[in-house]
Amino acid sequence: MSLKPVILSDPSIAKNACANIKLSKWQDGTPEAGLRAFALLNQFSQAKSITFDGSEGIFRFNKELLNSAVVRDCLTSTLKVVKFGRVNGYKHELCLSKFFMENGTVLERMSFSLASQELGKSKVMEDFKENLFSFKKGFSFAVVEFSYD
């Protein structure tokens, strides 16, 4: 069964909204899955908070989509909180994190909930954090935190 894009009937209702993107819902084995997720995300151009729940679908977001996303508008004016749920330290998670770190000029908090407690002490997560903190930052000050459920 192929998923169709979700289109808000009135995108203005998304003004100052909090978007919770459950990535596992966008996994249907096709490259278009990432396009559908971004079509939804782009409707939240003035969101204050975005949560990515489940990291497996993040790999479908490619750099071209990130660079052309309408969500850039909210990065410079309204987006204050970005949350990543069930992070494993994968390269595609780092890529999406980099996008928000470099472009989120009003960002106040970026949080990562790790997939497991053991991951917090692993070399993979150590490398993830090192890379994350090496990125150029678009914001002057933001709290970057790591936790596990």
Image (tube, helix red, strand yellow):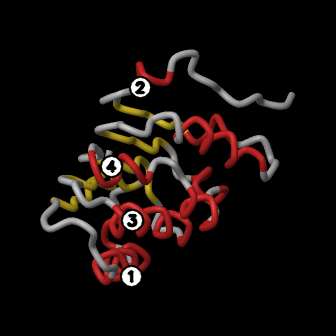
- Dot 3: element: helix
Measuring from the top left, give residue 122's x and y in whole percent. 37, 75
Badge 1 or badge 4: first in the primary sequence: 4
Residue displayed at 34% across by 79% down: 135
Viewer-nearest of discs 4 and 3 = 4
Viewer-nearest of discs 1 and 4 = 4
Q: CA distance from mark 3 to mark 1?
A: 12 Å
Q: CA distance from mark 4 to mark 3?
A: 20 Å
Measuring from the top left, give residue 44's x and y in whole percent. 45, 35
Instruction: In the rendered structure, find residue 119 and report the number of the disc placed on it.
Output: 3
Viewer-nearest of discs 3 and 1 = 1
Quarter of the rendering containing residue 134: bottom left
Q: CA distance from mark 2 to mark 1?
A: 36 Å
The residue that disc 4 covers is 82
Q: Is residue 81 above or below residue 117?
A: above
Residue displayed at 56% across by 66% down: 92
Furthest-top residue in this view: 9
Badge 3 or badge 2: first in the primary sequence: 2
Viewer-nearest of discs 2 and 4 = 2
Badge 2 or badge 1: first in the primary sequence: 2
Q: Are marks 2 and 4 in contact (CB under 8 Å)?
A: no
Q: Are marks 3 and 1 in contact (CB under 8 Å)?
A: no
Query: Mark 4: which amino acid?
Result: Val
Instruction: In the rendered structure, find residue 14 and report the number of the disc placed on it.
Output: 2
The residue that disc 1 covers is 127
Q: Are marks 1 and 4 in contact (CB under 8 Å)?
A: no
